[in-house]
Image (spheres, helix red, strand yellow):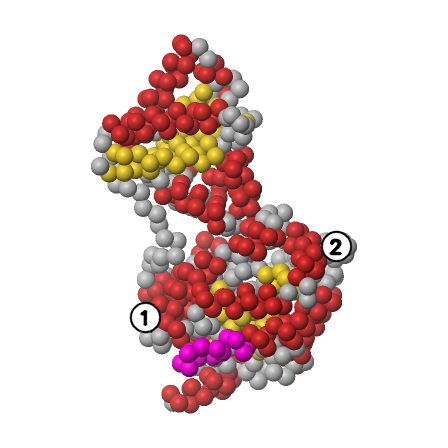
């Protein structure tokens, strides 16, 4: 099983002292966090893509390419890549280039983006969100698998005799996850292609995650990619830890109360009960996280959100130490217990290359 | 005998609340009328004041907490709705509107709705037709023709009170007739796929 971090890259004032990092500070902090993820023995660093303040990561492959050069084993991913407003041709080329530079340590998570104005800024309309996600991904899928593409669709200028360059490393496209909170069409899309499905699992009650994963697993089997239990599932999660759980609650509360997404709404206690957020000791985080399997089945990837809502870099790095030293080693061991042998790991470049040689 | 559920939503803030009094009158009359039509009424009363924090939380987080989700389900799954708001500053109250705002899209579509309102003077009574009726028209519900406004004097003398009861009876009969002649309400599963993937790929 893979463990890692996903970041949205928000620039948020620290509510405890009012200081706001500069964009430069925040960008450098994201790089430092990615390096730390590798140092503490986690597997994946995934970053968001946004085209509006207060977010900095508009250019994920630039940042991931830089991180690739400063890490050895870390798997680089996105959370999410905007499949709606990006040109699928540029996604095909940018991520194939990144895949070469990172020696295959790359996968992607597709998402639609939910900020209305971003669509018109890129010449699109949010009401076409699902249709864009379906058409653009269908083209991207083709561009990575067919050397010469003739294509015509609704949203992009047609292509005649087009070859996306560079070709994917070893002729094997990066593995793709599709992320969605509540659109069954996206679970269906992931199942259709035999791709992975990722549930945000942060802002919404677990029942939503359970329904979406259940639908994805059922349709994955329907399309003949394997059994429902073999579908490739990833989950988000949000934790804040201190050795003593009361310290965790006391320290996190001001960040929670002012957080951009849920601040000034439910209490920390309500939100902890209603969503997968866990604020407490490392043992509490272990117990809660192991419980995810009870409602989604054995899964392949667990990403945590750690560096948001104005938390200072120093605190985030301490959280990563706790995660790497005390939490993830136990999770790795415990998630293996009773895991059926035929439930696969998440695909990696190596496993996909091996599979392509078998099928060739 | 078949059964139909009436959800009764009242936005009154005070205890006792005149909006609640009006809602109870409307619900009781509609229930009696359903019984007369051979339908067993099941009445579920929702006082929005009890859910004020949950409604705000839902606005901010985008989801209904577990307890509040049951309230939303009750309204979405009801066969008919009695909706009563106090009139504040020329319109329905903010809390009442916020509740309608957090109901999932389409959850009132095709549902018979009886609108009621209360206010400090009868001069607010047109708010029923200028504010509540268009609000529920937007939700594609079937707003029954008679709306009922209760001013302070309606709770007083026999003559005025008798007039309120007449309006209540007429509105309740209209609601009951609309509810009784329909099949039981069904709730759409938001996680159900409505289009095949082949059709999605084909741009349909």
At x 52% / y 40%, what residue is drawn?
B51
Q: Tag 1's secondary structure?
A: helix
Question: x%, y% of residue A300?
Answer: 49, 74
Please determine whether, in this image, residue B172 is positioned above or below residue A130. above
Residue A255 percent coordinates (x, y): 68, 55
Figure disc tally:
2
**Residue at image location 39% in from the left, 24% down from the top:** B25
Residue B40 included in the magenta stretch of the image = no
Q: Residue at the location (64% across, 65% down)?
A: A281
Q: Residues within 10 Å of mark 2 (few under 14, many from 20)?
A: few
x, y percent for residue A141: 43, 74
Which of marks 1 and 2 precedes in the sequence? 2
Residue highlighted by disc 2:
A16
Q: In the image, which residues are magenta?
A: A332-345
Residue hosting label 1: A222
2 or 1: mark nearer the eye: 2
- On the question of residue B174 being in view, the answer is no
């Amino acid at each position: 099983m893979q463990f890692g971090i996903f970041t949205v890259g928000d620039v948020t004032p620290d509510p405890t002292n009012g200081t706001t990092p500069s964009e430069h500070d925040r960008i450098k902090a994201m790089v430092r966090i990615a390096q730390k993820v590798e140092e503490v023995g986690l597997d994946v660093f995934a970053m968001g893509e946004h085209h509006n303040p207060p977010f900095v990561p508009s250019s994920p492959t630039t940042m991931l390419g830089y991180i690739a050069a400063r890490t050895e084993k870390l798997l680089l991913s996105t959370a999410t890549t905007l499949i709606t407003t990006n040109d699928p041709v540029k996604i095909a080329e940018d991520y194939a280039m990144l895949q070469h530079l990172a020696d295959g340590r790359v996968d992607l998570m597709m998402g639609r983006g939910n900020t209305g104005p971003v669509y018109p800024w890129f010449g699109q309309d949010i009401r076409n969100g699902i249709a864009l996600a379906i058409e653009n991904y269908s083209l991207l899928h083709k561009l990575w698998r067919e050397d010469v593409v003739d294509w015509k669709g609704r949203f992009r200028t047609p292509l005649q005799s087009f070859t996306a360059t560079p070709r994917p490393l070893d002729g094997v496209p990066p593995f793709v996850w599709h992320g969605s909170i509540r659109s069954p069409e996206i679970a269906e899309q992931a199942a259709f292609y035999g791709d992975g499905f990722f549930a945000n699992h942060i802002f919404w009650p677990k029942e939503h995650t359970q329904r979406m994963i259940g639908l994805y697993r059922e349709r994955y089997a329907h399309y003949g990619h394997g059994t429902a239990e073999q579908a490739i599932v990833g989950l988000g999660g949000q934790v804040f830890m201190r050795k003593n759980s009361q310290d965790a609650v006391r320290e996190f509360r001001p960040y929670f109360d002012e957080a951009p997404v849920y601040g000034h709404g439910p209490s920390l206690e309500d939100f902890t009960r209603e969503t997968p957020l866990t604020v407490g000791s490392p043992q509490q985080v272990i117990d809660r996280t192991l419980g995810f399997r009870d409602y989604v089945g054995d899964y392949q990837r667990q990403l945590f959100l750690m560096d948001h809502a104005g938390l200072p870099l120093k605190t985030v790095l301490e959280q990563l130490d706790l995660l790497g030293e005390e939490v993830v080693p136990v999770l790795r061991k415990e998630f293996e217990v009773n895991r059926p042998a035929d439930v696969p790991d998440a695909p990696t470049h190596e496993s996909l290359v091996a599979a392509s040689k078998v099928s060739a | 005998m078949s059964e139909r559920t009436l959800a009764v939503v009242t936005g009154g803030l005070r205890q006792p609340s005149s909006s609640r009094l009006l809602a109870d009158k409307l619900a009781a009359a509609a229930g009696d009328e359903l019984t007369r039509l051979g339908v067993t009424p099941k009445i579920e009363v929702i006082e929005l004041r009890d859910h004020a924090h949950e409604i705000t939380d839902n606005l901010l987080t985008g989801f209904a907490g577990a307890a509040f989700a049951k309230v939303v389900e009750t309204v979405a799954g009801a066969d008919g709705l009695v909706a009563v708001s106090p009139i504040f500053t020329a319109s329905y109250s903010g809390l009442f509107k916020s509740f309608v705002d957090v109901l999932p899209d389409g959850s009132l579509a095709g549902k018979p709705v009886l609108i009621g309102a209360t206010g400090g003077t009868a001069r607010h009574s047109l708010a029923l037709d200028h504010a509540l009726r268009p609000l529920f028209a937007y939700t594609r519900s079937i707003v029954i023709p008679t709306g009922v406004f209760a001013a302070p004097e309606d709770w007083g003398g026999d003559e005025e009170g008798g007039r309120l009861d007449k309006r209540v009876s007429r509105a309740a009969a209209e609601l009951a007739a609309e509810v009784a002649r329909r099949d039981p309400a069904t709730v759409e599963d938001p996680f159900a796929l409505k289009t095949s993937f082949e059709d999605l790929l084909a741009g349909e």
